[in-house]
Amino acid sequence: MLPCRGGAEIAHRFFEPLGWTVKATPISLDDAFPDWGDSRYVHLRLDGTVRLADALNQLYVLLPVLDESKHYWQGPDEVDKLLRSGEGWLTDHPDKDLIARRYLGRSGDLTRSALARLAELGDEVDDAVEPAADEEVEQPVEKRIPLNTQRHEAVHAVLLELEAKSVIDLGCGPGQFLARLVKTSAFTRIAGCDVSARSLQQAGRRLHVDRMSERQSDRIELFQGALTYEDPRFAGFDAAVLMEVVEHVDQPRLEALESVVFGEARPGAVVVTTPNSEYNALYEGLVGMRHPDHRFEWTRAEFAEWSDRVASTYGYSVDVRGIGERDQQLGTPTQMAVFTRG
Ligand code: SAH
């Protein structure tokens, strides 16, 4: 059983040309609710007589390609790994371009280089390489400050402006922003929470929680939790940060998050950032949303409407701002709402 973006059909496309008999059965999201449709997982069975070394190389490349999971850990040696493991079967694969693109994730440069090198080994290059799609890698290389750094700076500045002493980063991911908070002595109590255990492990490593002095470890707390369920550990902070998190929550569950954060935890202030979908038009070649896990992306009007509704429902005032380079018509790449309890 494995995640397979693009449905069962893509497993047939990738494995059949290599001589496998493929049985790929989609797994429904929940048997009790057939209307919910299929999950992104399939049962995959491959039958065939293939040299073991080739079979292992094919799985090594194609399993992450099915999952499209390699987005987060690519280095320049990825192209070498792809060519090494693709030896003997990838150059002649009818979907070699798509495989290279999905294997190398969002890096257009790496994909171009892989396709050029594959071409040297055999066939012609497809010049229609999809450009990088993620906002972070999308920025032209020469641009000074990556968008996520600008975001961290902007939210950090707001927290100082609010004179928050205790801060909780809700959906902290691998802890980049926490690392910045830790360096600021004005924050005397810092917490990070995420639903992903793996992200929390990364955050723990980044912050060196294992080597912290007792005083430091009293100041910082990391815990696993879901923002759509009430949790007393979310309460008691001057400020909460929801940085690039709301768009990862299924829209029908967003109300639960609103009630947990604004209704139950009730920090003095909440800082929310989220993409401005209008700005996507400026990301050349971007099709769809900025990240495969985004459930939605809001226009400025949609975000303003959401912010106003949440503020008035839970007794906060809200101020909506932009982060990143502003386009006259389309606004800034990131939008930010600063909620304060009135
Ligand atoms: N705030 C970080 C990470 C953003 S990615 C940053 O700006 O870099 C979104 C994060 O939200 C992921 O780490 C994901 O695991 C987390 N997340 C998504 N849904 C969540 C939920 N319901 N409860 C808690 N965390 C959630």
Image: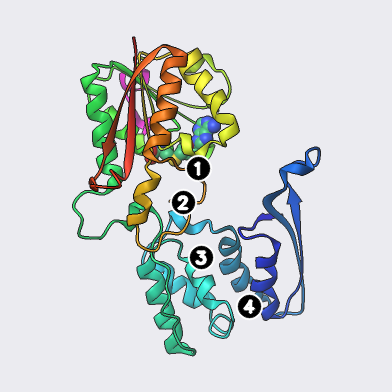
Q: Main secondary structure of the magenta part?
A: helix
Q: Which residue is mark 3?
A: 102
Of badges 4 and 2, the one in the foreground is 2
Dot 3 or dot 4: first in sequence order is: 4
Question: Is 261 above or below relative to 157?
Answer: above
Task: Please state which of the two labelled residues, at mark 1 or mark 4, is closer to the viewer.
Answer: 1
Give the class, few, some or many, for how many residues have Cα within 10 Å of label 4's Cα (few <14, many ≥20): some
Q: Secondary structure at mark 4?
A: helix
- The stretch in magenta equals 208-218
Label 4 vs label 2: CA separation?
35 Å
Amino acid type, mark 2: Met
**Residue at image mark 2:** 289
Q: CA distance from mark 2 to mark 1?
A: 8 Å
- State how far apart marks 1 and 4 are (Cα): 40 Å
Q: Is residue 46 left or right of residue 83?
A: right
Residue tagged by mark 4?
Answer: 54
Q: Which residue is mark 1?
A: 296
Q: Are marks 2 and 1 in contact (CB under 8 Å)?
A: yes
Indicate the quadrant containing the N terminus: top left, top right, bottom left or bottom right: bottom right
Q: Amino acid at mark 4?
A: Asp
- Does residue 203 show up? no
Amino acid type indicated by mark 3: Arg
Kindly report which numbered mark, 3 or 1, lies closer to the viewer in this rendering.
Answer: 1
Q: Nearer the viewer, residue 275 or 167?
A: 275
Q: CA distance from mark 3 to mark 4?
A: 20 Å
Judge left or right: residue 237 versus residue 59: left
Amino acid type at circle 1 is Phe
Category of crowding for the residue at label 2, using alpha-carbon neighbours closer than 10 angstroms: few (below 14), some (14–19), many (at least 20):
some
